[in-house]
């Protein structure tokens, strides 16, 4: 077995979009690459993929009676806890909220990159334990954590996770930064080729697995360190994170429902995507009309509630609207964990 889901699913849904996206960067005008996301790009990538994929978690929790019963305590109490914590954070400091959320998001995105690599190992029967498991962790965490660290240090960074200044300011001089890039990059890429050598020697390198690692390096190291482009990092990271999650959810649902022959993979993918796209639009509508007022051409005029004059009301809106995203971050660590509460996982990926 060379792939996670299947040859066609992996190549068409996981890697073809990223290949086309990276290819487009060579022909797009420089003003687009170096600029902010325009409305069309924002709708496709942020609303259509990033925000939407968050809502797809519903299909393995509240929209599934069996899954709800397995995780009932978490599903009942976690929303209340998240709303309370976010309300307090925003009420104390809006910048503190964005910083905390940015680091939680970074952790979530990086963990998913390793999570899919671990799924590849299990699915292709090349699962590793002990030091060999850490070799996989190093190749993924090196490709993601090092670029984020260099992002913090870069005195000329043009990137922001959510808002400008949401990361702690650790900027160093330009000269020192260039030296650090050279040192970190040399160490990492030497290790990457050593990792390939170890896997070839052990006959444990698979096509899909290698592509997953290569695109992780491109999307993080390439976009953040070598290109320093917010446009490239945002679009590639959203596609590499959101699309595989949609595929994972649809694949899981189709395999679990296989005995009933109700829906196949493509039908589940369509049902999930178009359902959550509606939820995502409604969420972004309220973000824009209640708080940000940045996209009147899409969402219309903002409601004149003067939230800037009421810290408590603003904190409440933030807490309610940030709930789906933050809850998704924590729910992922529970519903995709291979334990007794998720008995179908091993069956699906056997």
Image: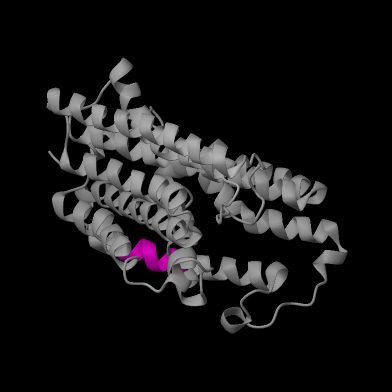
Q: Is residue 61 magenta?
A: no
Question: Which residue occupies the foreground of this view, 17 or 317?
Answer: 17
Q: Is residue 23 above or below residue 105?
A: below
Q: Position of residue 65 (x, y in %)?
A: 43, 47
Q: What secondary structure predominates along the stretch shown in magenta?
A: helix
Q: Is residue 137 above or below residue 11?
A: above
- Let me know if residue 342 appears in the view: no
In the displayed image of the protein, which residue is found farthest to the top? 130
Magenta segment boundaries in residue numbering:
270-277
Question: Which residue occupies the foreground of this view, 67 or 54?
Answer: 54
In the picture provided, is 334 more to the left or to the right than 161? left
Q: Residue at x 22, y 51 (%)?
A: 10
Report how many numbered discs are placed on residues in the image: 0
**Quadrant location, the N terminus:** top left
**Quadrant location, the C terminus:** top left
Q: Position of residue 309 (x, y in %)?
A: 87, 65
Q: Quadrant of residue 125?
A: top left
Q: Residue at x 37, y 35 (%)?
A: 140
Give the colour scheme of this rendering: one colour
Q: Quadrant of residue 271?
A: bottom left
Q: Position of residue 26 (x, y in %)?
A: 32, 66
In the picture provided, is 288 more to the left or to the right than 73? right
Question: Which residue occupies the foreground of this view, 324 or 144?
Answer: 144
Q: Position of residue 192 (x, y in %)?
A: 29, 32
Q: Is residue 272 magenta?
A: yes
């Amino acid at each position: 077995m060379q792939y996670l889901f299947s040859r066609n699913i992996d190549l068409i849904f996981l890697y073809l979009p990223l290949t086309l996206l990276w290819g487009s960067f060579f022909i797009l005008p420089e003003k687009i690459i170096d600029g902010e996301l325009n409305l069309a790009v924002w709708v496709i990538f942020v609303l259509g993929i990033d925000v939407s994929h968050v809502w797809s978690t519903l299909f393995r929790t509240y929209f599934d009676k069996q899954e709800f019963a397995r995780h009932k305590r978490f599903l009942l109490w976690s929303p209340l806890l998240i709303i309370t914590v976010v309300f307090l954070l925003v009420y104390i400091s809006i910048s503190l909220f964005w910083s905390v959320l940015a680091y939680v998001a970074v952790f979530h995105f990086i963990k998913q990159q390793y999570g899919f690599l671990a799924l590849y190992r299990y699915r292709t029967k090349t699962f590793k334990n002990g030091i060999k498991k850490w070799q996989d962790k190093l190749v993924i965490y090196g490709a993601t954590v090092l670029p984020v660290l260099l992002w913090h240090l870069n005195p000329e960074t043009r990137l922001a996770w959510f808002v400008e200044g949401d990361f702690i300011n650790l900027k160093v001089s330009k000269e020192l930064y260039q030296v650090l890039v050279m040192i970190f990059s040399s160490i990492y890429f030497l290790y990457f080729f050593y990792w390939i050598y170890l896997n070839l020697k052990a006959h444990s390198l698979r096509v899909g697995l290698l592509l997953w690692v290569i695109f992780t390096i491109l999307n993080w190291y390439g976009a953040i360190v070598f290109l320093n482009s917010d446009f490239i990092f945002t679009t590639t990271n959203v596609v590499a994170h959101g699309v595989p999650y949609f595929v994972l959810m649809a694949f899981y649902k189709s395999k679990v429902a296989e005995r009933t022959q109700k829906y196949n993979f493509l039908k589940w993918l369509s049902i999930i995507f178009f359902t959550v796209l509606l939820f995502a639009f409604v969420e972004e509508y309220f973000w824009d009309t209640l708080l940000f007022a940045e996209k009147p051409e899409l969402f219309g005029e903002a409601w004149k509630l003067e939230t800037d004059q009421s810290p408590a009301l603003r904190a409440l809106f933030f807490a309610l609207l940030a709930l789906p995203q933050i809850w998704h971050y924590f729910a992922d660590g529970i519903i995709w964990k291979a334990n007794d509460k998720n008995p179908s996982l091993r069956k699906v990926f056997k």
